[in-house]
Amino acid sequence: MSKLLEKTAALEPGKGGQRTERSTSARTAPGRMFEFTSRINDAEDRAAAASAEAAAVKKLLEEARQKIESLQQGQGAAGAIELAISSLVEVPGRRRILSPVEYEELRANLAKNKLIHPIVYLPRPDGTNEIVSGHNRVAIYRDLGRTTILGIPFSGDAKSAELGATFSNLLAPALPDFEKYRQFVRLQEESGFTRSDILEASGLSASHVSRILAFEKLPAAARAAIAMRPDRVGGHAAEEFAAIASSGNAEAVVKAIEALISDESMTQKRALELAKPKLARPAAPAARAIFVGKRKLCDVSVRGGVIGLRFNGKNNEAAVEDWASKIEAFIRSQIEEANK
């Protein structure tokens, strides 16, 4: 081992594949072995630190998830108070986007019934309250002219509140796949967590995660359109749209998705058909004319295994029938000849 180190350690790759003299490494075998050992130890330390950080992130995500679950299930309802709506502040991008039907149904419900699930808020030093969960309920209360709303304080720092808000959305029933994708991206950008940690803490299956990440492969203009109505494009459709876009039809995908968003009667299936490249129809073969002297008798065409004869003139049904009999007799004679 020491002989091999003596022969190779003083050399390093140079330009053109040549070897050049190393000037910074240790020149003795013990020195080089110490250097290699140090490098290995450094790599192991970095790996251990990364593993510890990943574990800490996962723990933080789980704690936030459990906290928001307990609040949503009413375990903190005893500490709920009537909160001034004017004090509530919404963090951009945090609110779940409802479809028009969902919003109207929730509005009709809140207009007639008492709020069952209090919102969750984070008190700020300036006296305002940051909405953690319940953005749409607050928006509807404002629309209805209400001045207060039942709320539960969130115990934790701003980062925990961000995690809690995200998982509040993820735990919402029938959350569109694009909303899940958008929340994952926000967590990654706002909190600096790795996507793998966020996805693992969300508890989603690998196939579901694959569908969610398909939105990332769509053109930016398509994602901007979907953000207006996340309920209009599901994860399965996103995968198909992404495949069409990657094959060189990104512009058609954007137009199809924009049409799907703007037209309530359009289905995802129809939008996918619009996005797919149109296959050019083969040109119809030219018809061949048969003349009797200078007068054209008929045109002969062949298409899709069908031989067509179009005779000139009107009121010539008798002549056409006569030619049909002659053609049939000719074909039969050819078959008989072939059988002999």
Image: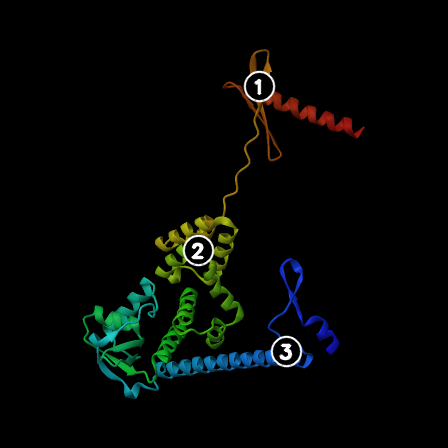
Figure colour scheme: rainbow
Pick the residue in front: 297 or 161: 161
Q: Earlier in the sequence, mark 3 or mark 1?
A: 3
Residue 1 seen anywhere in this rendered image of the structure: no
Label 2: which secondary element: loop
**Residue for point 49% across, 75% down:** 200
Circle 3 packing at 10 Å, graded few (<14), some (14-19), many (20+), is few
Place residue 124 in its image quadrant: bottom left
**Residue for point 46% across, 50% down:** 275
**Which amino acid lies under the numbered mark 3 shown in the image of this protein?**
Phe
- For this orientation, the residue located farthest to the right is 340
Q: Quadrant of the C terminus?
A: top right
Q: CA distance from mark 3 to mark 2?
A: 47 Å
Q: Quadrant of the N terminus?
A: bottom right
Q: Earlier in the sequence, mark 2 or mark 1?
A: 2
Task: Report the residue marked by disc 1.
Answer: 319
Task: Report the residue marked by disc 3.
Answer: 36
Q: Position of residue 197 (x, y in %)?
A: 48, 75
Task: Report the residue marked by disc 2.
Answer: 219
Q: CA distance from mark 3 to mark 1?
A: 100 Å
**Which amino acid lies under the numbered mark 1 shown in the image of this protein?**
Ala
Place residue 77 in its image quadrant: bottom left
Label 1: which secondary element: helix
**Which amino acid lies under the numbered mark 2 shown in the image of this protein?**
Pro
